[in-house]
Image: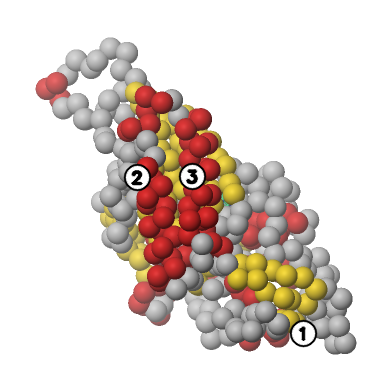
Amino acid sequence: TYYNHHIYNRYRALNHHANMDNQLPPEVPVAKEEVAPRPVNFSRTFYGIMFDAGSTGTRIHIYKFIQKDPVELPVLDNEMYHAVKPGLSAYADMPAMGGETIRQLLKVAKKTIPKEQWIQTPVVLKATAGLRLLPQEKAKALLDEVKEIFDDSPFFVPNNSVTIMNGTNEGVLAWVTVNFLTGHLYAKTKRTVGILDLGGGSTQITFLPRLKKTVLTAPEDYIARINMFNSTFELYTHSYLGNGLIAARLATLGALGADGLDWKVFRSSCLPKKFREDWSFGGLTYKVSGIPDGFAGYKLCYQEVLRVVKGIVHQPFEVKGSSIFYAFSYYYDRAVESGLIDGSRGGTVEVRDFKKRAKEGKTLDVLPFSKEHSGQSPAAHIAQT
Ligand SMILES: Nc1ncnc2c1ncn2[C@@H]1O[C@H](COP(=O)(O)OP(=O)(O)O)[C@@H](O)[C@H]1O
Protein backbone atom coordinates (compact mmCIF):
# COMPACT_ATOMS: atom_id res chain seq x y z
CA THR A 1 0.00 0.00 0.00
CA TYR A 2 1.11 3.50 -0.55
CA TYR A 3 -0.53 6.60 0.75
CA ASN A 4 1.04 9.93 0.08
CA HIS A 5 0.82 13.36 1.56
CA HIS A 6 0.67 15.05 -1.82
CA ILE A 7 -2.87 13.86 -2.13
CA TYR A 8 -3.66 16.26 0.67
CA ASN A 9 -2.40 19.17 -1.36
CA ARG A 10 -4.58 18.15 -4.27
CA TYR A 11 -7.67 17.19 -2.37
CA ARG A 12 -9.74 20.01 -3.78
CA ALA A 13 -9.03 18.81 -7.30
CA LEU A 14 -10.01 15.22 -6.63
CA ASN A 15 -13.51 14.00 -6.23
CA HIS A 16 -13.40 10.24 -6.36
CA HIS A 17 -16.78 8.57 -6.90
CA ALA A 18 -15.99 5.83 -4.46
CA ASN A 19 -16.32 6.64 -0.81
CA MET A 20 -13.30 8.71 0.15
CA ASP A 21 -14.08 10.52 3.36
CA ASN A 22 -12.42 13.85 3.72
CA GLN A 23 -10.25 13.31 6.76
CA LEU A 24 -8.57 16.67 6.64
CA PRO A 25 -8.45 18.92 9.65
CA PRO A 26 -11.12 21.62 9.74
CA GLU A 27 -10.45 23.94 6.86
CA VAL A 28 -9.37 27.51 7.32
CA PRO A 29 -12.23 29.71 6.12
CA VAL A 30 -11.43 30.88 2.62
CA ALA A 31 -11.38 34.69 2.43
CA LYS A 32 -14.06 36.06 0.12
CA GLU A 33 -13.38 38.94 -2.27
CA GLU A 34 -15.12 41.54 -0.13
CA VAL A 35 -13.23 40.53 3.01
CA ALA A 36 -10.22 41.92 1.18
CA PRO A 37 -7.47 42.93 3.60
CA ARG A 38 -5.64 39.77 4.50
CA PRO A 39 -4.35 39.29 8.00
CA VAL A 40 -0.77 40.35 8.23
CA ASN A 41 1.62 37.57 9.20
CA PHE A 42 -1.02 34.92 8.72
CA SER A 43 0.66 31.58 9.16
CA ARG A 44 -0.82 28.39 10.42
CA THR A 45 0.92 25.13 11.20
CA PHE A 46 -1.04 21.94 11.52
CA TYR A 47 -0.43 18.20 11.59
CA GLY A 48 -2.09 14.99 10.42
CA ILE A 49 -1.48 11.40 11.50
CA MET A 50 -1.96 8.61 8.98
CA PHE A 51 -1.59 4.91 9.80
CA ASP A 52 -0.98 2.51 6.95
CA ALA A 53 -1.96 -0.90 8.31
CA GLY A 54 -0.46 -3.20 5.67
CA SER A 55 -0.35 -6.98 5.60
CA THR A 56 3.35 -7.07 6.49
CA GLY A 57 3.68 -4.05 8.77
CA THR A 58 2.03 -1.02 10.34
CA ARG A 59 3.44 2.39 9.48
CA ILE A 60 2.75 5.80 10.95
CA HIS A 61 3.17 8.92 8.82
CA ILE A 62 3.07 12.22 10.69
CA TYR A 63 2.68 15.18 8.36
CA LYS A 64 3.37 18.78 9.20
CA PHE A 65 1.70 21.41 7.02
CA ILE A 66 2.23 25.12 6.86
CA GLN A 67 -0.35 27.47 5.44
CA LYS A 68 1.16 30.87 4.86
CA ASP A 69 -1.91 32.51 3.40
CA PRO A 70 -5.59 31.78 4.10
CA VAL A 71 -6.45 31.59 0.40
CA GLU A 72 -3.56 29.34 -0.54
CA LEU A 73 -3.43 25.60 -0.07
CA PRO A 74 -1.30 24.37 2.82
CA VAL A 75 2.15 23.11 1.91
CA LEU A 76 3.76 19.99 3.31
CA ASP A 77 6.69 21.02 5.48
CA ASN A 78 7.82 17.73 6.95
CA GLU A 79 6.99 14.05 7.30
CA MET A 80 7.94 11.79 10.17
CA TYR A 81 7.76 8.06 9.54
CA HIS A 82 8.00 5.01 11.72
CA ALA A 83 7.15 1.35 11.08
CA VAL A 84 6.63 -1.83 13.06
CA LYS A 85 6.42 -5.48 12.04
CA PRO A 86 4.44 -7.65 11.81
CA GLY A 87 1.22 -6.04 10.62
CA LEU A 88 -2.10 -5.90 12.49
CA SER A 89 -3.40 -9.06 10.84
CA ALA A 90 -0.71 -11.08 12.62
CA TYR A 91 -2.69 -10.36 15.80
CA ALA A 92 -5.92 -11.81 14.42
CA ASP A 93 -6.38 -13.90 17.57
CA MET A 94 -5.06 -11.34 20.05
CA PRO A 95 -6.49 -7.95 19.10
CA ALA A 96 -5.33 -6.36 22.37
CA MET A 97 -1.71 -7.05 21.43
CA GLY A 98 -2.34 -5.69 17.95
CA GLY A 99 -3.73 -2.54 19.55
CA GLU A 100 -0.58 -2.24 21.62
CA THR A 101 1.48 -1.76 18.42
CA ILE A 102 -0.73 1.22 17.57
CA ARG A 103 -0.35 2.63 21.08
CA GLN A 104 3.44 2.44 20.72
CA LEU A 105 3.33 4.23 17.38
CA LEU A 106 1.11 6.95 18.84
CA LYS A 107 3.91 7.67 21.29
CA VAL A 108 6.01 8.72 18.32
CA ALA A 109 3.23 11.11 17.31
CA LYS A 110 3.12 12.60 20.82
CA LYS A 111 6.85 13.21 20.69
CA THR A 112 6.69 14.78 17.23
CA ILE A 113 3.62 17.02 17.53
CA PRO A 114 3.54 19.97 19.97
CA LYS A 115 1.11 19.34 22.83
CA GLU A 116 -1.13 22.31 22.08
CA GLN A 117 -1.76 20.89 18.57
CA TRP A 118 -2.83 17.40 19.69
CA ILE A 119 -6.54 18.15 20.04
CA GLN A 120 -6.89 19.39 16.46
CA THR A 121 -4.61 16.80 14.85
CA PRO A 122 -6.67 14.15 13.02
CA VAL A 123 -5.65 10.53 13.34
CA VAL A 124 -6.72 8.00 10.71
CA LEU A 125 -5.95 4.35 10.02
CA LYS A 126 -6.47 2.63 6.69
CA ALA A 127 -5.96 -1.11 6.59
CA THR A 128 -5.23 -2.99 3.38
CA ALA A 129 -4.96 -6.61 2.25
CA GLY A 130 -3.97 -8.16 5.58
CA LEU A 131 -7.32 -7.28 7.13
CA ARG A 132 -9.25 -7.88 3.92
CA LEU A 133 -7.99 -11.47 3.99
CA LEU A 134 -9.13 -12.10 7.58
CA PRO A 135 -12.56 -13.44 8.54
CA GLN A 136 -14.82 -10.41 9.03
CA GLU A 137 -15.22 -10.80 12.80
CA LYS A 138 -11.46 -10.98 13.38
CA ALA A 139 -10.84 -7.90 11.26
CA LYS A 140 -13.61 -6.07 13.11
CA ALA A 141 -12.16 -6.97 16.52
CA LEU A 142 -8.82 -5.45 15.46
CA LEU A 143 -10.43 -2.30 14.07
CA ASP A 144 -12.54 -1.89 17.23
CA GLU A 145 -9.41 -2.18 19.34
CA VAL A 146 -7.64 0.47 17.29
CA LYS A 147 -10.68 2.77 17.50
CA GLU A 148 -10.65 2.48 21.30
CA ILE A 149 -6.98 3.39 21.40
CA PHE A 150 -7.60 6.39 19.15
CA ASP A 151 -10.51 7.51 21.37
CA ASP A 152 -8.24 7.26 24.43
CA SER A 153 -5.57 9.33 22.70
CA PRO A 154 -5.39 13.14 22.90
CA PHE A 155 -5.78 13.46 19.12
CA PHE A 156 -8.81 14.40 17.00
CA VAL A 157 -10.66 11.26 15.84
CA PRO A 158 -12.83 12.00 12.77
CA ASN A 159 -15.81 9.82 11.84
CA ASN A 160 -14.83 6.54 10.21
CA SER A 161 -11.23 7.09 11.17
CA VAL A 162 -10.44 3.36 11.38
CA THR A 163 -11.42 1.43 8.26
CA ILE A 164 -10.36 -1.12 5.69
CA MET A 165 -9.62 0.65 2.43
CA ASN A 166 -11.03 -1.16 -0.57
CA GLY A 167 -8.78 -2.33 -3.39
CA THR A 168 -10.19 0.17 -5.90
CA ASN A 169 -9.36 3.14 -3.69
CA GLU A 170 -5.91 1.69 -3.01
CA GLY A 171 -5.18 1.47 -6.73
CA VAL A 172 -6.71 4.81 -7.66
CA LEU A 173 -4.94 6.74 -4.89
CA ALA A 174 -1.59 5.25 -5.87
CA TRP A 175 -2.23 6.33 -9.47
CA VAL A 176 -3.14 9.89 -8.42
CA THR A 177 -0.06 10.07 -6.18
CA VAL A 178 2.41 8.88 -8.77
CA ASN A 179 0.96 11.05 -11.53
CA PHE A 180 0.98 14.07 -9.25
CA LEU A 181 4.60 13.45 -8.27
CA THR A 182 5.68 12.94 -11.87
CA GLY A 183 3.86 16.08 -13.04
CA HIS A 184 1.24 14.33 -15.15
CA LEU A 185 -1.78 15.46 -13.21
CA TYR A 186 -3.46 18.47 -14.80
CA ALA A 187 -6.64 19.30 -16.72
CA LYS A 188 -7.05 17.33 -19.98
CA THR A 189 -3.91 15.33 -19.29
CA LYS A 190 -3.29 12.68 -21.95
CA ARG A 191 0.14 11.38 -21.08
CA THR A 192 -0.14 9.71 -17.72
CA VAL A 193 1.78 6.79 -16.26
CA GLY A 194 0.41 3.53 -14.92
CA ILE A 195 1.14 2.05 -11.51
CA LEU A 196 1.98 -1.42 -10.31
CA ASP A 197 1.94 -1.94 -6.55
CA LEU A 198 3.01 -5.31 -5.15
CA GLY A 199 2.07 -5.54 -1.47
CA GLY A 200 2.29 -8.59 0.78
CA GLY A 201 -1.39 -9.55 0.54
CA SER A 202 -2.63 -7.86 -2.64
CA THR A 203 -1.31 -6.32 -5.82
CA GLN A 204 -2.76 -3.38 -7.74
CA ILE A 205 -2.60 -2.25 -11.36
CA THR A 206 -4.02 1.12 -12.43
CA PHE A 207 -3.66 3.11 -15.65
CA LEU A 208 -5.57 5.55 -17.84
CA PRO A 209 -6.51 3.63 -20.99
CA ARG A 210 -5.77 5.33 -24.29
CA LEU A 211 -7.96 2.94 -26.21
CA LYS A 212 -11.74 2.89 -25.83
CA LYS A 213 -11.50 -0.86 -26.46
CA THR A 214 -9.65 -1.32 -23.16
CA VAL A 215 -12.55 0.21 -21.24
CA LEU A 216 -15.18 -1.69 -23.21
CA THR A 217 -13.52 -5.08 -22.89
CA ALA A 218 -12.53 -4.81 -19.22
CA PRO A 219 -14.69 -6.45 -16.56
CA GLU A 220 -17.12 -3.75 -15.37
CA ASP A 221 -15.68 -3.45 -11.86
CA TYR A 222 -12.18 -2.85 -13.28
CA ILE A 223 -13.18 0.63 -14.42
CA ALA A 224 -13.24 3.43 -11.84
CA ARG A 225 -14.50 6.88 -12.69
CA ILE A 226 -12.93 9.78 -10.88
CA ASN A 227 -13.66 13.48 -11.23
CA MET A 228 -10.74 15.85 -11.47
CA PHE A 229 -10.50 19.32 -12.98
CA ASN A 230 -14.16 19.21 -14.02
CA SER A 231 -13.75 16.12 -16.14
CA THR A 232 -14.22 12.43 -15.59
CA PHE A 233 -11.31 10.05 -15.90
CA GLU A 234 -12.06 6.42 -16.60
CA LEU A 235 -9.27 4.45 -14.99
CA TYR A 236 -8.54 0.78 -15.41
CA THR A 237 -7.85 -0.45 -11.89
CA HIS A 238 -7.84 -3.76 -10.11
CA SER A 239 -6.59 -5.13 -6.84
CA TYR A 240 -5.82 -8.85 -6.85
CA LEU A 241 -6.48 -9.96 -3.29
CA GLY A 242 -4.35 -12.94 -2.28
CA ASN A 243 -1.80 -12.19 -4.97
CA GLY A 244 0.52 -9.95 -3.02
CA LEU A 245 4.05 -11.30 -2.78
CA ILE A 246 3.68 -13.22 0.48
CA ALA A 247 0.09 -14.44 -0.02
CA ALA A 248 0.82 -15.61 -3.57
CA ARG A 249 3.95 -17.38 -2.40
CA LEU A 250 1.90 -19.28 0.18
CA ALA A 251 -0.72 -20.05 -2.46
CA THR A 252 2.01 -21.46 -4.70
CA LEU A 253 3.01 -23.72 -1.84
CA GLY A 254 -0.61 -24.81 -1.50
CA ALA A 255 -0.52 -23.45 2.04
CA LEU A 256 -2.97 -20.56 1.88
CA GLY A 257 -6.26 -21.66 3.44
CA ALA A 258 -4.93 -25.20 4.08
CA ASP A 259 -5.48 -27.10 7.31
CA GLY A 260 -3.02 -29.19 9.32
CA LEU A 261 -0.52 -26.35 9.63
CA ASP A 262 0.90 -27.96 12.80
CA TRP A 263 2.28 -30.94 10.99
CA LYS A 264 2.13 -30.30 7.22
CA VAL A 265 5.26 -29.18 5.42
CA PHE A 266 4.49 -27.25 2.24
CA ARG A 267 7.01 -27.94 -0.49
CA SER A 268 7.91 -26.08 -3.61
CA SER A 269 10.40 -26.30 -6.43
CA CYS A 270 10.68 -22.51 -6.12
CA LEU A 271 12.75 -23.07 -2.97
CA PRO A 272 16.26 -24.54 -2.80
CA LYS A 273 16.15 -28.31 -2.24
CA LYS A 274 17.60 -28.17 1.26
CA PHE A 275 15.63 -25.15 2.41
CA ARG A 276 13.35 -25.50 5.41
CA GLU A 277 11.78 -22.71 7.49
CA ASP A 278 8.70 -21.49 9.34
CA TRP A 279 6.94 -18.54 7.70
CA SER A 280 4.34 -16.42 9.51
CA PHE A 281 1.67 -14.41 7.75
CA GLY A 282 -1.77 -13.20 8.84
CA GLY A 283 -1.41 -14.72 12.30
CA LEU A 284 -0.60 -18.24 11.04
CA THR A 285 2.71 -20.08 10.81
CA TYR A 286 3.51 -22.34 7.89
CA LYS A 287 6.26 -24.96 7.65
CA VAL A 288 7.81 -24.67 4.21
CA SER A 289 10.63 -26.40 2.42
CA GLY A 290 12.20 -27.20 -0.92
CA ILE A 291 11.77 -30.67 -2.42
CA PRO A 292 14.81 -32.49 -0.95
CA ASP A 293 14.62 -35.51 -3.25
CA GLY A 294 13.25 -33.58 -6.23
CA PHE A 295 14.18 -30.59 -8.33
CA ALA A 296 14.31 -26.84 -7.90
CA GLY A 297 14.54 -24.20 -10.58
CA TYR A 298 12.93 -21.73 -12.90
CA LYS A 299 10.92 -24.03 -15.16
CA LEU A 300 9.23 -26.06 -12.44
CA CYS A 301 8.69 -22.99 -10.31
CA TYR A 302 7.13 -21.16 -13.27
CA GLN A 303 4.64 -24.03 -13.73
CA GLU A 304 3.75 -23.92 -10.02
CA VAL A 305 3.14 -20.19 -10.07
CA LEU A 306 1.17 -20.43 -13.32
CA ARG A 307 -1.27 -22.81 -11.64
CA VAL A 308 -2.01 -20.10 -9.06
CA VAL A 309 -2.47 -17.15 -11.39
CA LYS A 310 -4.07 -18.95 -14.35
CA GLY A 311 -7.54 -17.68 -15.08
CA ILE A 312 -7.17 -14.92 -12.50
CA VAL A 313 -5.08 -12.31 -14.24
CA HIS A 314 -6.85 -10.09 -16.74
CA GLN A 315 -4.34 -8.87 -19.30
CA PRO A 316 -5.45 -5.72 -21.07
CA PHE A 317 -4.07 -5.75 -24.59
CA GLU A 318 -3.06 -2.09 -24.37
CA VAL A 319 -0.24 -2.52 -21.82
CA LYS A 320 1.61 -4.84 -24.17
CA GLY A 321 2.86 -1.81 -26.08
CA SER A 322 5.21 0.84 -24.85
CA SER A 323 3.24 1.98 -21.81
CA ILE A 324 5.21 3.41 -18.90
CA PHE A 325 4.44 1.97 -15.50
CA TYR A 326 5.84 2.99 -12.14
CA ALA A 327 6.32 -0.10 -9.99
CA PHE A 328 6.89 0.08 -6.26
CA SER A 329 6.62 -1.79 -2.93
CA TYR A 330 7.89 -5.35 -3.42
CA TYR A 331 8.59 -4.75 -7.13
CA TYR A 332 11.06 -2.11 -5.98
CA ASP A 333 12.44 -4.23 -3.10
CA ARG A 334 13.04 -7.23 -5.35
CA ALA A 335 14.54 -5.15 -8.16
CA VAL A 336 17.03 -3.65 -5.68
CA GLU A 337 17.81 -7.00 -4.05
CA SER A 338 18.49 -8.68 -7.36
CA GLY A 339 20.72 -5.82 -8.46
CA LEU A 340 18.46 -4.60 -11.27
CA ILE A 341 18.18 -1.04 -9.97
CA ASP A 342 19.97 1.28 -7.60
CA GLY A 343 18.45 1.39 -4.10
CA SER A 344 18.49 5.15 -3.73
CA ARG A 345 17.86 6.32 -7.28
CA GLY A 346 15.50 3.63 -8.52
CA GLY A 347 15.79 2.83 -12.18
CA THR A 348 14.15 1.55 -15.33
CA VAL A 349 13.59 -2.13 -15.92
CA GLU A 350 11.63 -4.27 -18.29
CA VAL A 351 9.62 -7.33 -17.29
CA ARG A 352 12.16 -9.48 -19.15
CA ASP A 353 14.89 -8.26 -16.76
CA PHE A 354 13.03 -9.80 -13.82
CA LYS A 355 12.62 -12.99 -15.84
CA LYS A 356 16.32 -13.12 -16.67
CA ARG A 357 17.25 -12.71 -13.00
CA ALA A 358 14.74 -15.39 -11.99
CA LYS A 359 16.36 -17.80 -14.46
CA GLU A 360 19.72 -17.05 -12.94
CA GLY A 361 18.18 -17.88 -9.58
CA LYS A 362 18.92 -14.43 -8.23
CA THR A 363 15.37 -13.49 -7.32
CA LEU A 364 14.88 -16.74 -5.46
CA ASP A 365 15.03 -14.77 -2.29
CA VAL A 366 13.70 -17.09 0.34
CA LEU A 367 13.19 -14.66 3.17
CA PRO A 368 9.50 -14.11 3.71
CA PHE A 369 10.00 -10.53 4.80
CA SER A 370 12.73 -8.39 3.44
CA LYS A 371 14.04 -5.34 5.26
CA GLU A 372 11.62 -2.51 4.75
CA HIS A 373 13.17 0.70 3.63
CA SER A 374 12.20 3.83 5.45
CA GLY A 375 10.11 6.71 4.21
CA GLN A 376 9.20 7.23 0.62
CA SER A 377 11.12 5.19 -1.82
CA PRO A 378 12.08 6.25 -5.29
CA ALA A 379 9.87 4.30 -7.60
CA ALA A 380 11.32 1.77 -9.95
CA HIS A 381 10.03 2.30 -13.48
CA ILE A 382 8.94 -0.65 -15.44
CA ALA A 383 8.70 -0.13 -19.15
CA GLN A 384 6.49 -2.94 -20.27
CA THR A 385 7.46 -4.81 -23.36
N1 LIG B 1 5.66 4.59 2.34
C1 LIG B 1 6.03 3.60 1.54
N2 LIG B 1 6.66 3.83 0.38
C2 LIG B 1 7.02 2.83 -0.44
N3 LIG B 1 6.80 1.53 -0.19
C3 LIG B 1 6.15 1.23 0.94
C4 LIG B 1 5.74 2.22 1.87
N4 LIG B 1 5.11 1.59 2.90
C5 LIG B 1 5.15 0.27 2.62
N5 LIG B 1 5.79 0.03 1.47
C6 LIG B 1 6.08 -1.28 0.82
O1 LIG B 1 4.90 -2.08 0.77
C7 LIG B 1 5.27 -3.47 0.76
C8 LIG B 1 4.46 -4.20 1.78
O2 LIG B 1 3.10 -4.10 1.49
P1 LIG B 1 1.97 -4.17 2.61
O3 LIG B 1 1.41 -2.80 2.77
O4 LIG B 1 2.50 -4.80 3.84
O5 LIG B 1 0.96 -5.16 1.94
P2 LIG B 1 -0.57 -4.95 1.47
O6 LIG B 1 -0.64 -3.64 0.70
O7 LIG B 1 -0.80 -6.12 0.58
O8 LIG B 1 -1.37 -4.91 2.71
C9 LIG B 1 6.77 -3.52 1.07
O9 LIG B 1 7.47 -3.73 -0.13
C10 LIG B 1 7.04 -2.14 1.61
O10 LIG B 1 8.39 -1.75 1.36
The residue at label 3 has a CB less than 8 Å from ligand 1: no
* Residue at x 70% of width, y 64% of height: 368
In this picture, residue 75 sits left or right of residue 297: left
Q: Which residue is mark 3?
A: 103
Q: Amino acid at mark 3?
A: Arg
Q: Residues within 10 Å of mark 1 (few under 14, many from 20)?
A: some
Query: Can you say whether 161 is above or below 279 in the image?
Result: above
Callout 1–callout 2 Cβ contact below 8 Å: no
Q: Amino acid at mark 1?
A: Leu
Q: Give the position of the C terminus as an image quadrant.
A: bottom right
Q: Compute the Cα span from label 1 to label 2.
A: 52 Å
Q: Residue furthest top?
A: 40
* Residue at x 83% of width, y 73% of height: 275
Q: In front here: 204 or 108? A: 108
Res. 300 mark = 1
Give whichever of discs 1 and 2 has the lower sequence position: 2
Q: Position of residue 363 (x, y in %)?
A: 76, 66
Q: Which residue is mark 2?
A: 151
